[in-house]
Image (cartoon, grey):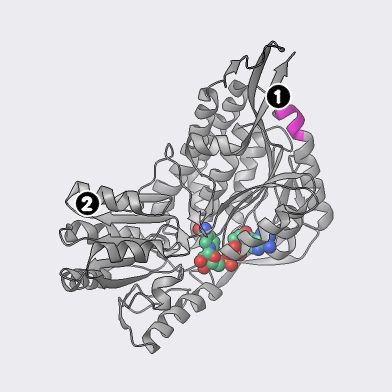
Amino acid sequence: MSAFGTSLFINGEFVAGEGRVETVYEPALRKPMAEVASASKGQIDQAVKAASGACRDWSQRTPRERSAALLAIAAAVEARAVTLAEVESRNAGKPLRFVKAGELANVADVFRYFGTAVRNMPAPAAGNYRSSVLTSLVRRDPIGVIAQIAPWNYPLLMAAWKIAPAIAAGNAVVIKPSELTPLSLLALSEVFAEILPAGVVNVVCGSGPDVGQALISHDLVRMISLTGDVRTGRAVLQAAAGPMIKRTHLELGGKAPVIVCEDADLDKLVETLREASFYNAGQDCTAACRIFAHRNVVQALTDKLKAMIGSLVYGRPERDDVEFGPVISARQLERVDGFVSRARAGGCDVMQGAPAESDGYFFSPTLVAAPIEAEIVQKEVFGPVLSITPFADVRTALDWANASEYGLGSSVWSRQTEQAMAIANALEYGVTWINTHGVMATEMPHGGMKNSGYGSDLSMQSLIDYTQIRHIMLG
Ligand code: TXE
């Protein structure tokens, strides 16, 4: 049975939600796209119990068997890439050509990578550390039921980042997509229904405070993984400190600084920022959103950025010439507009690209020249907005970057490798790029520091994060 738009996926079956009905919008049109009935409290309980039951068998499967399932999911994603991309593009407002060629390929790659990685996890050591016993073994075991809360900016890709390592490691999951973008994960659940044993992956839809909160508070949940706002991260930590203590894995956004030294290649930088700042309408936790530029190059850089922003093409996601689409919702549009309006009212110089079409939640690409203390330089805007602030010496730029509450993505631009490396080493950020920005590799860890959270997505490290280390001593 098709899940699209109307169902939950619990214990291998598509079932109608018994909770509140949420209208899901198409942001490029400001129009409803589907009605999705949320999970009731009883259905959340059923999903968690289904995961708990499925875990008993799934956790005992060999890496080879689990790997085969993940590789089959990757192939099925590729076979359905066009349909999945169309759903994702309409619901999240992303240019269809990028979703087809980039994001869906990455979803398949993530399942394929973790399907391979789990067979390459080294067996932990055995040894003897006391004369009175025979040996000590270290095991890396699954944790159990993982509650996963996914965001709306990359609905399917973030779901893949969460589900693939968790099930590869032998856990079972109950995942809640964002109430704004549940449709692509419901469509992908048809693949889970065909390939995975019932209960290994369960999908419950609904709002954060309602369905999300009930899910993360459930006593059978052993770990909570979230990609979302800092405020939501705090709700997760509180739920984790309930009657049953839970592990947590948090990715809570960022405010990526771009430190531009006097000798930086400005043309390469501007070409990179075209995508690194504006892909997905800037709704990206590592988006290059605040430039700290040496005062001797700030004017030249501002001129080049203005020209680039003036040439950016944005609009309806099905057009094959657009670089980005609308922001996700009326609320996000209001939020982004609020930041820019307050910057303008506070005396910042605001430069914008082509005016936005009014039929969708579009926001014109924007450059704001602002002092370091301005709200727009300090807070996560999550829209197609870039700020630029001059500095006199690199030490100041480094101090500004490290004073941030966030610590996820950052980049350094300099032709002198030693200078760039010294700055990169001193940055308190989980990811630092040198002379590039925003490039990801499935094999490399992605995660933050400070209010950006902790725990790694992608890489062998993520697989390790979804396991529990155990010691068994043989007397
Ligand atoms: O996030 P929420 P919002 C940042 C970004 C954005 C801001 C607000 O700055 O402008 O957050 O976005 C679920 N228990 N990021 O309000 O609410 C929610 O249903 C359990 C950065 O939309 O955190 C959704 O599934 N779940 C970010 C998910 O949390 C709860 C991605 C994320 O939405 C919950 C998204 C609760 N009490 C926003 N409350 C990134 N790190 O990339 C909410 N949720």
Q: Quadrant of residue 144?
A: top right
Residue at screen point 32% across, 58% down = 275
Give whichever of discs 2 and 1 has the lower sequence position: 1
Give the label on residue 419, or none. 2
In this orientation, does residue 323 appear? no
Specify the amino acid type for callout 1.
Gln
Magenta stretch mostly in which secondary structure?
helix
Task: Give the magenta-colored segment's residue range.
Answer: 54-58
Q: Quadrant of residue 105?
A: top left
Residue 16 drawn in magenta:
no
Give the label on residue 60, or none. 1
Seen in the picture, residue 299 relative to 437 is either above or below; the reply is below
Specify the amino acid type for callout 2.
Gln
Seen in the picture, residue 343 relative to 228 is either above or below; the reply is below
Q: Quadrant of the N terminus?
A: top right
Seen in the picture, residue 226 relative to 328 is either above or below; the reply is above
| x then y, percent, for residue 104 | 47, 45
| x then y, percent, for residue 405 | 48, 64
Q: Quadrant of the C terminus?
A: top right
Residue at screen point 46% across, 71% down = 379
Residue at screen point 34% across, 79% down = 355
Q: Nearer the viewer, residue 114 or 104?
A: 114
